[in-house]
Image (spheres, rainbow, N blue to C red):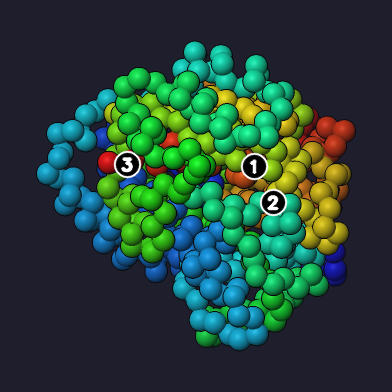
Amino acid sequence: MPVRTEVLMGTFVTIDVVADDADAGAIDRAFAWFHTIETACTRFDEDSELMRLCAPPGRAVAVSDVLFEAIRFAVAVAEDTGGACDPTVGAAVAARGVDREHRTGRRVRAAVVDERASYRDVIVDEAARAVLLRRPLTLDLGAVAKGLAVDAAARELAPLVDFAIDAGGDLFLAGHNRHGEPWSVGIRHPRVDGELIETVRVSNRAVCTSGDYEKAHLVDPRTGASPSRAASATVLAPNAMLADALATAAFVLGPAEGIALLERHGVDGVIYGSDLSRVATTALARA
Amino acid sequence: MGKQGQDRKVANGLVALSSAAVLAVYSAGYTRTRAAADRFTAQTEARRPAVAEPQPVAVVAPPAPAADRAPAPVNRRPVPSSRKRTRQRSIAAITPPAPTPALSAAPTPSAPALAAPSAPSASSASASAQATADKPQYHDGTYFGWGTSRHGDIQAQVVIENGRIAAATIAQCLTRYSCSVIARLPPQVAERQSPEVDYVSGATQSTNAFYYAVVEALGQAKAK
């Protein structure tokens, strides 16, 4: 039962395969996905493909498949949520000091950023697989890239059937655990360190949580402030990229609008309000 | 937000779009990743005996003594103005005798311990894939690293056993705020091993100094 942890994408990534005789090569390939996707999508490396795209605004730049899919999805989520989850908040995040390249500790500054920039300034050209930025801005694909890496790794591991991927709390749970049951996943208590507020059983699902215990990261792109109406939002979805994006958006939108968003997308989730009141989609509703 | 009918159309699109994106990325990268992995297989065939140990690898279970002295006691200590000197002294004080030659060699008194670890900062895709392929790549032992944030510095202790990360704990906390804020990170994986649940879903602390400190310590574990 190989369990392996590496430090990647700003967090600890653990891959846990139930089968004793699992192919170690598959696990290596799964970890390699994190490298590949981080290399393209990091904004903490001035030479990354993402930062080269962000450098000269105003012209269409053909990008790699990884970057294209990540940006297209990030913009689609922003459009769908009215900007509740907006990849152009890079500047707002940097202003809060999250501007250190995590592998070297070197500080990175986005060049010039137009404060009025939003996802509407990111033009995705489907035919040419190109991206055009209409204003100077920095795309922050952190969450999307991490989700995408989890999903690509999950695809790589698919032949192994029963496995779990944990990228710092962003999870993909495939098949069953060592007891032959669906994986049990605890949802971190947003107010009490080290405690769980509830647990869910999942199989072949990604689980992601956004919470107000990481304030520095979650900024409402519409106001530039940290949202306060939800304490945490957890989403169960077919893939981690979607689960992460919808958890972030649902958290920003707050309990009522957040649940409506999840139901509209046909994914399950549970949102705790700042008073710890609980709202959930039907499948997770309590009797 | 917006008109219900329109939303519904877009909504279905997001689920489909994300699935298609994962498939596209996976298919496009398949060849490259496969190539890197095949190289890895070729390389490891040679040293198979060492790798093939069927022993399960323990993961980030913080050892009791380190955990004890980890977050709380040093917390409120104000960050001294001559921080670099203090930092040097405290590194010397905790450097374990045997396995950390890299640490004493690395920083000069004037250069902060944050010097970039050279090995992991390779930035081209192939180099990164290659780095993965070369695992296990850490040397057994106990390593220390510093991470800085606007709120102060944190020293991490990382224990490598059998070439893998066995534990990562906070050795010193020189932040203005209590390290209890990030104390959840070191046992993050151990938490998962609790009898209660298989895994814990929760937002990550991807930006904290502890992370940089671990990265630095791992840079030393890789060096040589």
* Tag shown at residue B223: 3
| Residue sitting at x 54%, y 68% | A50
Inspect this view and state whether residue A179 appears.
no
Q: Secondary structure at mark 3?
A: loop
Front residue of A73/B78: it is: B78
Q: Which residue is mark 1?
A: B149
Q: Are marks 2 and 3 in contact (CB under 8 Å)?
A: no
Q: Position of residue A1 (x, y in %)?
A: 34, 30
Q: Position of residue B110 (x, y in %)?
A: 50, 42
Q: Chain of mark 1?
A: B
Instruction: Residue A201: name its quadrant.
Output: top right
Q: Position of residue A267 (x, y in %)?
A: 67, 51
* Tag shown at residue B104: none
**Mark toward the start of the polypeptide (1 vs 3):** 1
Considering only vertical position in the picture, is B126 above or below B94? below
Between the residue at mark 2 and the residue at mark 3, the CA separation in whole angstroms equals 29 Å
| Residue sitting at x 54%, y 82% | A61
Q: Secondary structure at mark 1?
A: strand
Q: Which residue is mark 2?
A: A97
Front residue of A35/B78: it is: B78
Q: Secondary structure at mark 2?
A: loop
Between the residue at mark 1 and the residue at mark 3, the CA separation in whole angstroms equals 25 Å
Residue type pointed to by label 3? Ala
Q: Chain of mark 3?
A: B
Inspect this view and state whether residue B32 appears.
yes
Residue type pointed to by label 1? Ser
Between the residue at mark 1 and the residue at mark 2, the CA separation in whole angstroms equals 8 Å
Location of the C terminus of chain B (image quadrant): top left
| Residue sitting at x 44%, y 53% | A34
Q: Are marks 1 and 2 in contact (CB under 8 Å)?
A: yes
Residue type pointed to by label 2? Gly
Q: Chain of mark 2?
A: A
